[in-house]
Image (tube, grey):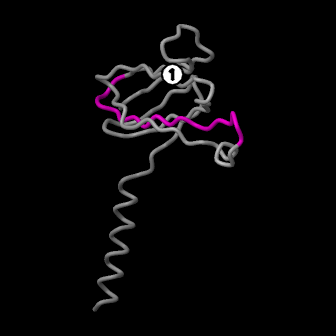
Amino acid sequence: MKRLLVLVAVVTSFMLAGCMGEVRTYTDSGQTIDIGVNQEFVIALGSNPTTGYSWQESYDKNMVELVEKTYEPGKEAKQGIVGAGGVEYFRLKTLKTGETEITLVYKRPGEEETIAQKVFKVNIK
């Protein structure tokens, strides 16, 4: 009986994990992200905060919600190499159907000058 309960618990956890689906990660600007309402996705962009630059996000808050913004140091940065960068992650959630854009600009906070700009089109079904 105990083995049966363990088996049922394991199978149930795998089924629930499959229902949740995986969160897709996007790295190429200019692409269209097709996604459903109340779904999450991640935009991942190379970054090096030791230079003072970071990605500044801009989007329609009625269409998309920023769930979490994180930075993960790269392998070289973890090894203590000075000036090494990593990746900034933007975890976003769709709020309602429609089309919108997410613009990310690589610049220092408070400065007008930008090094790069990435635009992602989002089609929420």
Q: Secondary structure at mark 1?
A: strand
> Is residue 17 depicted above or below 75 in this figure?
below
Query: Which span of residues is magenta-colored?
Result: 81-98
Report x, y in % for residue 76: 70, 44
* 31 with respect to 41 (left or right): right
Mark 1, Cα crowd under 10 Å, few <14 / some 14-19 / many 20+, is many
Give whichever of 16, 118 is nearer the camera. 118
Report x, y in % for residue 111: 52, 10
* 1 with respect to 81 (left or right): left
Residue occupying the point 40% across, 34% down? 92
Figure quadrant of residue 8: bottom left
Figure quadrant of residue 106: top right
Report x, y in % for residue 3: 34, 89
Residue 117 highlighted magenta (yes or no):
no
Q: Residue furthest top?
A: 112
Q: Residue furthest bottom?
A: 1
Give whichever of 98, 22 is nearer the camera. 22
> Is residue 93 depicted above or below 104 in this figure?
below
Residue under circle 1?
104
Give whichever of 85, 17 is nearer the camera. 85
Q: Which of the image's four quarters has the C terminus? A: top left
Report x, y in % for residue 74: 64, 43
Residue occupying the point 36% across, 37% down? 67
Which kind of residue does numbered mark 1 sit on? Leu
Q: How many marks?
A: 1
Residue occupying the point 67% across, 47% down? 75
Q: Which of the image's four quarters has the N terminus? A: bottom left
